[in-house]
Image (cartoon, grey):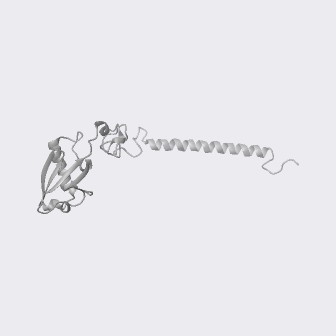
Amino acid sequence: SRACKMSCGDVTLKITLTPKLLKKPFEEAVLAPFLKAYSKKAGLYGGRLPVPMDVSRVTVDETMLGDHRLPGSVILLANQTVEIDVTLKPPPSPAAQAGSVPGFCDSPFGYADPFAAPTAAGASARDPPGGTVDFDGKTEVERLKEQRRATRLARENAEAAVGLGTSAFAQGNGVAGGGGAT
């Protein structure tokens, strides 16, 4: 087993890893359990439990750790307690979590949980592709395609009618037949 002394702000905890946990990625074996214990001592992070994505930096014995997916056995030393400092990103504001400020949210969906109910910022990942289905059984995209198709057909029919009228007019004046006045 190997041990580390982890700290984040005012909270410091000692974590000991078994050989089984040392095979797992650092993020899963060390960071996630630390963040869970951290939230019990320091309180919730922006109204929720912190997750590894909320970490902005991890330093191991004053050296920044770049890849959190490395096995714990690579990061932690045998027979020596390693000091690890975790720095969290600033907690998201409640407005950013609700989706009203999509530019300041960590989520690419514009709100904290991609499976949450839709908000003004956008649709939920659970919504059917193309928007919600209305009573006619068509999505917004299908209705838009249908409207564009109808507009295109009307325009083509109008152009065809104008084209037929022009050629009939030309034939009536003897232009299309090639037998003009001499």
The residue sitting at 23% across, 60% down in the picture is: 70
Identify which residue, 101 or 140, lies in the foreground. 101
The residue sitting at 28% across, 37% down in the picture is: 94
User: Residue 159 falls in which quadrant of the image?
Assistant: top right
Q: Is residue 173 above or below residue 3?
A: above
**Residue 17 x, y percent position in the rendering:** 13, 58
Q: Is residue 153 above or below residue 58?
A: above
- Quadrant for the N terminus, please: bottom left
Number of on-image labels: 0
Q: Is residue 100 above or below residue 87?
A: above
**Residue 171 x, y percent position in the rendering:** 77, 46
Identify which residue, 138 or 116, lies in the foreground. 116
Asked if residue 87 lies left or right of residue 172, the reply is left
Asked if residue 173 lies left or right of residue 133, the reply is right
Identify which residue, 111 or 143, lies in the foreground. 111
The residue sitting at 43% across, 39% down in the picture is: 136
User: Residue 83 falls in which quadrant of the image?
Assistant: bottom left
Q: Residue furthest front?
A: 62
Q: Residue furthest right?
A: 182
**Residue 142 x, y percent position in the rendering:** 46, 44
Identify which residue, 138 or 9, lies in the foreground. 9
**Residue 182 x, y percent position in the rendering:** 88, 49
